[in-house]
Image (tube, helix red, strand yellow):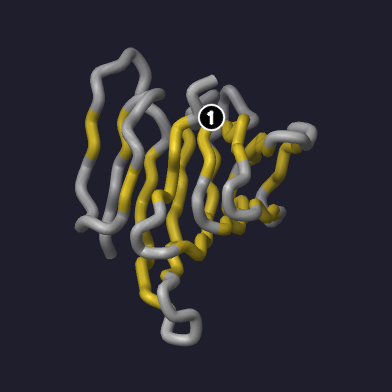
Amino acid sequence: MNALRFFAASFTVLTLTVSASAFAHETAAPSENVTILQDQMLKNAPGKKALMIEVDYQPGQSSIAHKHQGTAMAYVLSGAITSQVKGEKAITYKAGEFWYEPAGSEHLVSKNASATQPAKLLVFMVLAPDEKVLIPLEN
């Protein structure tokens, strides 16, 4: 199992065309921890790969606003996650609930809904090997 850990509220774009590595940036508060569980080329969809990641949020933690070049499906493993995609209202999903994000969606809010309990999210993505998993939004 490859593991990636992101530290910071702001970080550079993650590209998975290189081998998994750790990124560390100097800021006041660490962001969520991200672990790559699987990264596989798809034989039935030439030029695409499947990526499965686990996102761990500490109480009150959030991701930076971002978009994904690939399609994403998310499932809350534990706790509660508040998510908002541009043009939609923010929704809080509890353990066992899930959502879908089309490729290119701008993910404005992704955060642990609790200030006291951790939360964990499983994300499955389909993208081209040269596409970026996460692109920080400027505003």
Classify 91 as above or below 43.
above
Task: In the displayed orientation, state which residue is furthest to the bottom.
Answer: 44
Pointer 1: residues within 10 angstroms few (<14), some, or many (20+)?
many
- Give residue 12's position: percent from left, percent from top: 32, 33
Position of residue 57 measured from the top left corner of the image (x, y, whole percent): 48, 36
Kindly indicate the quadrant of the structure image that contains residue 7: top left
The residue lying at 32 percent from left, 49 percent from top is 15
Q: Position of residue 118 (x, y in %)?
A: 52, 36
Which part of the image, by quadrant, shows the N terminus? bottom left
- Quarter of the image where the C terminus is located: top right
On screen, residue 60 versus residue 43, left or right, reads right
Q: Amino acid at mark 1?
A: Ala
Q: Is residue 56 left or right of residue 101?
A: left
**Helix, strand or loop for disc 1:** loop
Residue 89 x %, y %: 79, 33
- Residue closest to the eye, 96 or 28: 28
What residue appears at the point 44 percent right and 43 percent down from the top-left corner? 134
